[in-house]
Image (cartoon, grey):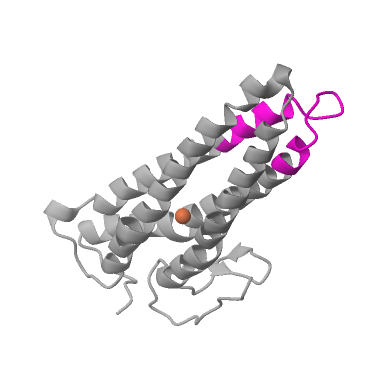
């Protein structure tokens, strides 16, 4: 992961609160919201777009190789995957086309009219709920495949599926944390301050 460290310039947005370090850590620093967003899209969103087709292939392998006793239950992985695909696609589009642009727009504003107050907070709540649904679906897939895992169960290919699910779940945890701490939290705070007529710390 590249180091996206930026300036410590005084007066940066409160936004500016997060540094994505070379080890993926997040620290208080002078990184702008825009830079954290670019990092999230280039790493976490891009990773999901690569991982989901690999996950589908692994599910196909698991279901194709399932024993007669387990085939019916393991085939439930397909509808779970379809729901996951729809949720992830919806979340990435929602964030990239609506949430992040809305956040970037308020970064350079000094006030927010009453009719627009709370829009960022509302979009953030939706995006957070989307993340929860994605995590729940991943957990269901992991639990389902774990029930048939060899050597106690018959499923050899479930090991590879478990590994892929663990990788995606770990990425989602970091993705969620970075968005909450590095983007959503500061943006909601900024929106509330701008709505209250307090433009301190807004970058120009
Ligand atoms: Fe995201």
- Relative depth, front residue between 167 and 119: 167
Which residue is most to the top?
69
- Relative depth, front residue between 193 and 129: 129
- Percent coordinates x, y for residue 117 in the rendering: 20, 52
Does residue 196 show up?
no
Q: Is residue 196 left or right of residue 133?
A: left
* First to last magenta residue range: 138-161
Please say if 173 is above or below 106: above
Residue 191 is a magenta residue: no
| Image quadrant in which you'd find residue 96 | bottom left
Image quarter where the N terminus lies is bottom right
Which residue is most to the right?
151
Q: Is residue 27 left or right of residue 151?
A: left
Please say if 58 is above or below 10: above
Residue 142 is a magenta residue: yes
Identify the residue at horizontal 22%, vertical 70% (top origin): 110
- Percent coordinates x, y for residue 162 in the rendering: 72, 39
Q: Is residue 176 left or right of residue 54?
A: left
Please say if 56 is above or below 193: above
């Amino acid at each position: 992961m590249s180091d996206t460290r930026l300036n410590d310039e005084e007066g940066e947005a409160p936004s500016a609160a997060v540094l994505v370090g070379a080890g993926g850590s997040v620290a208080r620093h002078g990184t702008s919201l825009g830079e954290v967003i670019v990092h999230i899209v280039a790493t976490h969103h891009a990773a999901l777009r690569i991982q989901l087709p690999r996950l589908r292939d692994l599910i196909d392998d698991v279901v194709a190789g399932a024993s007669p006793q387990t085939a019916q239950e393991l085939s439930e992985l397909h509808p779970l995957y379809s729901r996951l695909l729809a949720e992830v696609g919806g979340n990435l589009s929602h964030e990239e086309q609506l949430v992040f642009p809305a956040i970037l727009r308020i970064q350079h504003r000094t006030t927010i009219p009453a009719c627009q107050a709370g829009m960022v907070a509302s979009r953030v709540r939706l995006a957070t709920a989307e993340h929860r649904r994605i995590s729940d679906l991943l957990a269901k897939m992991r639990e389902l495949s774990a029930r048939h895992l060899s050597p106690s169960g018959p499923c050899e290919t479930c090991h590879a599926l478990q590994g892929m699910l663990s990788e995606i779940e770990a990425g989602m945890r970091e993705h969620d944390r970075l968005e909450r701490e590095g983007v959503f939290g500061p943006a909601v705070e900024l929106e509330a301050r701008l709505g209250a007529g307090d433009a301190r710390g807004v970058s120009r």
